[in-house]
Image: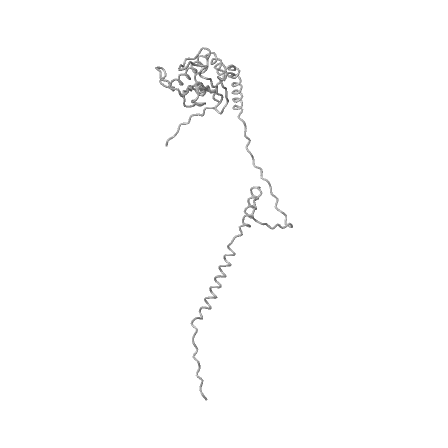
Amino acid sequence: MARRKREEEHENHERWLVSYADFITLLFAFFVVMYAISSINEGKYRVMSDSISSAFRAVPGNTSGAMVAVNSNVASPTTIPIRRNVPNVKTDPQQTVKKEKLRNMAKELNQALAPLVAEGKVKVTEGALGITVDINASVLFAPGDARLDIIAQRALITVAEILAPTDFPVLVEGHTDNTPINTALFPSNWELSTVRAASVVRLFVDSGMDPRRLSAAGYADQRPVADNASPDGRQQNRRVAITIESRTPDNAVEVNLE
């Protein structure tokens, strides 16, 4: 009987691929599970954050963009409002009295200067710094001069009599238009405006006002109230401004440079 030759069995060298494929599959599944666990539902996170904020602040939360399932069988938490103490802003009695004095003073000045106010030569205004009396320079001085007219002196003495009993600081400012001046007494509008302000201050002192309350300043044509291009505008800019200041001076503090 013929002897069959056994077929030689060939060894499979790619058997390791099966184990490698199983390992890769398990590793992929592991990372999928880890990603699923680590991912956060943004909608639920916002709801939780707003709920915590509402509980501590007693402010309704904002849950726009998120859907929340509410169980009607579970009692909803009770929100306890928190009372916050709002500081009461108290009005300073001294400031109230000061404002009342200033307003009464403004009325007295308006009444005393009523004819000039009616002519548009004097204007009494109330602002942040206090009361300001704007007097047109044509009422007080001749063109290019700083000597007070006799009629102007009477008006200013009336103003001084109203201001003298008070303790408010008074600032007198001289203003001109942009027309240049060059004389022996006034080389420029700076000198003219300053001397005009000083003339009014000197009259106030002679009328009984405390010199420590008074100050004078000249601004030439640097602070116009109207356009200097027209004659009417230049006339408005030639003025003396008397400001009764309502500000309380601060205590001086030395600055340490170290």
Q: Is residue 43 above or below residue 202?
A: below
Q: Is residue 1 above or below residue 59?
A: below
Q: Residue furthest right?
A: 73
Could you say where residue 177 lies in the image, as x and y percent from the top left? 41, 20
Could you say where residue 255 lies in the image, as x and y percent from the top left? 39, 29
Q: Residue furthest front?
A: 230
Could you say where residue 14 lies in the image, as x and y percent from the top left? 43, 70
User: As rendered, which of 183 and 22 lies closer to the eye?
Assistant: 183
Could you say where residue 95 lies in the image, as x and y percent from the top left? 52, 24
Q: Quadrant of the C terminus?
A: top left
Question: Going by the image, does 55 lie left or right of 6?
Answer: right
Q: Is residue 42 above or below residue 122?
A: below
Question: Going by the image, does 47 lie left or right of 141?
Answer: right
Q: How is the image coloured?
A: one colour
Q: Is residue 115 above or below residue 78?
A: above
User: As rendered, which of 82 and 211 lies closer to the eye?
Assistant: 211
Q: Residue furthest top?
A: 150
Q: Residue furthest left?
A: 184
Q: How many numbered discs sit on the rendered protein? A: 0
User: As rendered, which of 28 and 195 lies closer to the eye?
Assistant: 195
